[in-house]
Amino acid sequence: MDVLNALLQGFDTALSLTNLVWALIGCALGTAVGVLPGIGPATTVAMLLPITAKVDATASMIFFAGIYYGAMYGGSTTSILLNTPGETANLVTAMEGNLMAKSGRAGQALATAAIGSFVAGTIATVIVTLFAPVVAEYAVQLGPPEYFLLMALAFTTVSAVLGQSTLRGMTSLFIGLAVGLIGMDQISGQPRYTGSKAELFDGVDIVVMAVGLFAVAEVLHAALFEGGLAESENRLTRVHMSRRDWRRSVPAWLRGAAIGSPFGCIPAGGAEIPTFLSYAAEKKLAKGADLAEFGTTGAIEGVAGPESANNATVTTALIPLLTLGIPISNTTAVMLGAFQNYGINPGPQLFSSSGELVWALIASLYIGNVMLLVLNLPMVGLWVKLLRIPRPQLYAGILIFATVGAYGMRQSAFDLLVLYLIGAAGVLMRRFDFPTAPVVIGMILGPLAEAQLRNAMSIGEGKWSVFVERPISVVLIAGIAAVVLLPRLLRLLQRSRAGRVPS
């Protein structure tokens, strides 16, 4: 009953005219961002972080959330019509969706993607409503040792899963941890790694880091390495679904939501894994003529299931962000930075210290899902027209907006220098396949992990045994060891089996 009352109060806040306008703008902008390939929600949220200096916290978080899940809706349009996924989570949608478009069924593919996103997003939002307060209640009982190990688990899982190489992921993480050390020491008050620059005494600004690493690096990388890409667009047909399409899509939507929801609750690296699992499940369950469409003319289940899994994962990813302060993707990492710009630290106390904001944000998820269904089904023709914006003008606008936004935070030329140095580093990371999410996560969570480590050692009077005195700590250590060692052991086992196979 407490949850219901809190949610109703959240709706009361979210349904105010101001917050509704911000939600609508966020959903529309998120859809546009999803449609335009190569930009992505993390880049957009990072680019718009400077608004946190001027806009109310509740309104801006509703706005950023709209961009976050709106981009997942819009990403299917580009994947289906252009075979160009805006996010890696849309890769699977492109596989069958583009085949459907080529066979004259683009409208059916877009319809099942939009409705499936709505269904899965709503189911996942109910899960967030019911379980986020429970997770927060239990998380209050965790002490500094458990929190440090929880952050260490987030570091290892995100670094190991994102990107093509665990070593590259860990390297990115340590870069972020190193950047997080810049500034005044939390206990002694001594400056660290500042190079006697007064502008660095407060550390590298998260806005500058996020904008440089995502927006500036994206534009520079596109200008340097992607200028010659040609795209072919499939013809958009009427957005509708036949009775057979509904019969095949509804079970796929529900299965996708069931597969994707648990993955959002754990630091497992985003929506890529559940979308592939959903696709594999739909292909395994298909029979006869339905199975024959996979990989040929395009199977509607291959669009419905992965899109549902994608949106369910994206929505339930707010549970670890809000209750534990742990992001599991690029966008949630940047949103964590937005919270901190307001002096708000997501974690177990968030539901009590900033309950009005949290419940308004959760209520806005329900509202945003309805808005996005309306924006994506009747107005899909409008979003397709965005694909005709020339890339040079689009990226030039992003670069100007990012530069003005970063400068506007403190009117500092030094910040611009740091911005473009980070942007250049981001280009190198993209060029050599180093994931960027661990950098932001390391920078934001690094100082918090350091504080928890110091507190834990203080509680244990300098003894490391404090980390194995409680069962939850032992479980977390086992989880960290499994993430680091298990993939290597499995690879060694596969190699040994391959070596025993007679030639």
Image: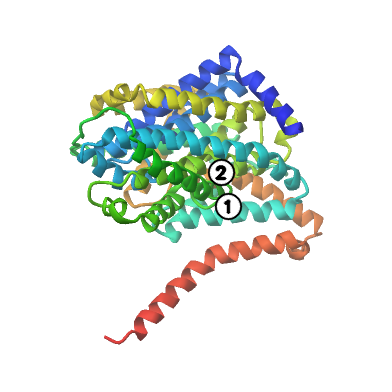
Q: Is residue 482 above or below residue 85?
A: below
Residue 471 against residue 265 in the figure, above or below: below
Identify the residue shown where x is 52% and y is 24%: 63
Q: Are marks 1 and 2 in contact (CB under 8 Å)?
A: yes
Q: Which residue, given by chain and number where applicable, does mark 2 sit on?
A: 327
Q: Position of residue 256 (x, y in %)?
A: 47, 47
Q: Nearer the viewer, residue 449 or 60?
A: 60
| Image x and y of residue 113, in percent | 38, 37
Would you say 306 lies left or right of 18 here? left
Per the model, the C-alpha gap separating discs 1 and 2 is 8 Å
In the image, taking residue 368 as reference, residue 8 lies left or right, namely right
- Residue 216 rendering spot, x and y as whole percentages: 37, 34
Residue lying farthest to the top in this orientation: 17
Circle 1 SS class:
helix
Asked whether the viewer can see residue 170, the reply is no
Tell me if residue 486 can be seen. yes
Q: Is residue 428 left or right of residue 197?
A: left
